[in-house]
């Protein structure tokens, strides 16, 4: 008999400290629920259960996370909406505070704050209303059309053409901008479209706005239009230098 083998009459050896058993794995066909229960009962890195959703079904802070991720990750829809809102706000501020009457009213802001704010608001909104009537639809031309004696007289006197003239002129002038924007957005001849767009704005600034500015040096509207044309020209050339997609994409 070996020395290491205890005899039948030898006292039993003391056992070591007992090791506590881990959490039992519950039976069932859902391993993910079982793992979650084990992780929750573990003393290290316990998993905190998520809070209950609100009354509308959204978890707390979920809307804010979605908006933040959409902005940070460059979601096209959110960025487009934010760009439109920013353009409307900045354009309204420029229209309001480039008006001498508004600036004079804001000089007396502390004596008549309501008048200054309302005048700035009316100026900004009025500019957008005039822009809409001059580029899309003017209700005054429609009312003048229905005041004519006959439809043939309205056509002969040009009242019918006046109804569609704003939209038709907008389509004629905006078609190059729309095509270039689509080319950049879908990356089909994007570099060529941006380059042609920059050349078009450069021609506008040099051959259209520069002579007008030379004839009316003290006209703020002409200077504003010229600066905008140059800014759009620079932006288009910048996009042409940074955008990818100079080759036409084949559609399978």
Image (cartoon, rainbow, N blue to C red):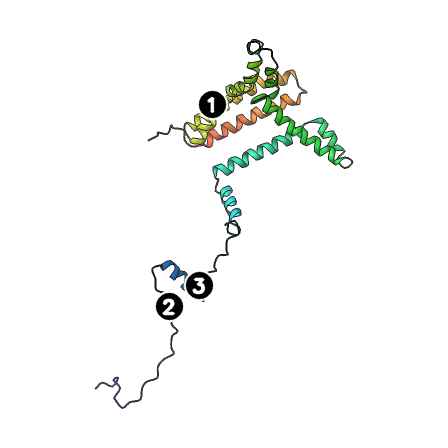
Where is residue 181 drawn, in percent x and y? 47, 28
**Separation (CA) of disc 1 from disc 2:** 71 Å
> Mark 1 — residue?
196
**Separation (CA) of disc 1 from disc 3:** 62 Å
> Mark 2 — residue?
24
Which quadrant is the N terminus positioned in?
bottom left
Callout in the foreground (1, 2): 2
> Mark 3 — residue?
40
Q: Secondary structure at mark 3?
A: helix
The dot on residue 252 is: none
Residue at image coords 59%, 18%? 142
Q: Is residue 86 above or below residue 148?
A: below
Q: Is residue 16 above or below residue 105?
A: below
Q: Is residue 94 above or below residue 18?
A: above
**Separation (CA) of disc 3 from disc 2:** 12 Å
Which quadrant is the C terminus positioned in?
top left
Residue at image coords 56%, 19%? 166
- Is residue 33 something that shows in the picture? yes
Where is residue 145 drawn, in percent x and y? 59, 15
Label 1 vs 2, first from the N-terminus: 2
Of 211 and 178, nearer the camera is: 178
Label 3 vs 2, first from the N-terminus: 2
């Amino acid at each position: 008999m070996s020395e290491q083998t205890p005899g039948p009459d030898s006292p039993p050896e003391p056992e070591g400290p007992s090791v506590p058993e881990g959490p039992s794995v519950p039976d069932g066909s859902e391993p993910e629920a079982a793992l979650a229960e084990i992780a929750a009962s573990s003393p290290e890195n316990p998993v905190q259960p998520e809070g209950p959703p609100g009354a509308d079904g959204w978890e707390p802070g979920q809307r804010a996370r979605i908006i933040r991720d959409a902005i940070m990750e460059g979601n096209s829809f959110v960025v487009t909406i934010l760009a439109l809102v920013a353009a409307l706000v900045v354009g309204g501020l420029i229209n309001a505070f480039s008006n001498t009457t508004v600036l004079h009213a804001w000089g007396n802001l502390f004596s008549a704050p309501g008048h200054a704010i309302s005048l700035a608001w009316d100026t900004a909104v009025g500019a957008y209303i005039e822009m809409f009537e001059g580029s899309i639809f003017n209700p005054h031309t429609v009312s003048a059309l229905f005041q004519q004696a006959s439809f043939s007289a309205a056509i002969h006197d040009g009242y019918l053409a006046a109804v569609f003239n704003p939209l038709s002129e907008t389509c004629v002038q905006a078609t190059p901008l729309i095509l270039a924007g689509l080319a950049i957005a879908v990356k089909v001849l994007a570099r060529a479209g941006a380059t042609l767009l920059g050349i078009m704005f450069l021609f506008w600034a040099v051959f259209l706005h520069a002579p007008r500015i030379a004839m009316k040096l003290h006209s703020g509207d002409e200077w504003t239009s010229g600066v905008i044309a140059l800014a759009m020209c620079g932006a288009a050339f910048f996009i042409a230098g940074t955008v990818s997609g100079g080759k036409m994409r084949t559609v399978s």
